[in-house]
Image (cartoon, rainbow, N blue to C red):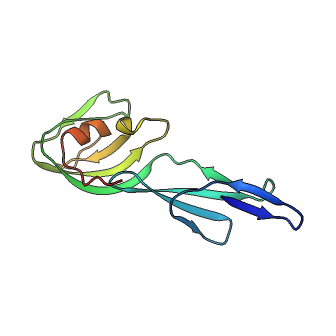
Amino acid sequence: MIYWFNGNEIIFMNHLSRWPEFKGNGIVYLNDWVGFWSCRDKYVLDYSERKLKHVDQFAYFVGKQIKIEKGFKIYREKELVNEVAMLEDNSEIELILCDKVNREFFEHRYLIKSQSGLLGWANFKSINENSILPMAD
């Protein structure tokens, strides 16, 4: 819980959980654990309202290499249409980005770089069912 004291009263600013990093300039970075990688959010102090406001991102950087056991399809669009490639069994992929905005955990979309250098999207369910992820809660 983040509060501000204006000299007369205590005012609630926001509730942040998990590893906040206060920069001292009105910016707070917040790292959150997503099972096998850490995502970073940014909050900025709105001085007029004295509230910490979330800065929306297009996607989150993942930067994890994993080995897949069974190949699965990757797609050109996040809606998982227009197949780019079928990943090879027992190959390595790099998870570059995650779009987790307004999606259930198993429907998070990951931008994947294949072993052959192709880029495409897949949902977490496909990745999880076809690889061994070092998951921890």
Q: Is residue 51 left or right of residue 92?
A: right
How far across and down, in percent of the image, does residue 124 sit? 31, 40
**Is the N terminus in the top left, top right, bottom left or bottom right quadrant?**
bottom right
**Furthest residue in direction bottom, as rendered:** 24
- At x 39%, y 51%, the residue is 34
Q: Is residue 21 left or right of residue 8?
A: left
Is 67 situated above or below 99?
A: below
**Furthest residue in direction top, as rendered:** 81
Is 24 situated above or below 131?
A: below
- At x 30%, y 50%, the residue is 95
Choose top left, top right, bottom left or bottom right for residue 120.
Answer: top left
How many marks the image carries: the answer is: 0
**Furthest residue in direction left, as rendered:** 90
Can the viewer see residue 45?
Answer: yes
How far across and down, in percent of the image, does residue 87 sit? 16, 40
Q: Is residue 5 left or right of residue 34?
A: right
How far across and down, in percent of the image, does residue 3 sit? 73, 61
Can the viewer see residue 51?
Answer: no
Please tell me which residue lies in front, 28 or 110.
Answer: 28
How far across and down, in percent of the image, does residue 97 sit? 37, 49
Choose top left, top right, bottom left or bottom right for residue 33.
Answer: bottom left
- At x 55%, y 56%, the residue is 17
Is 98 situated above or below 123?
A: below
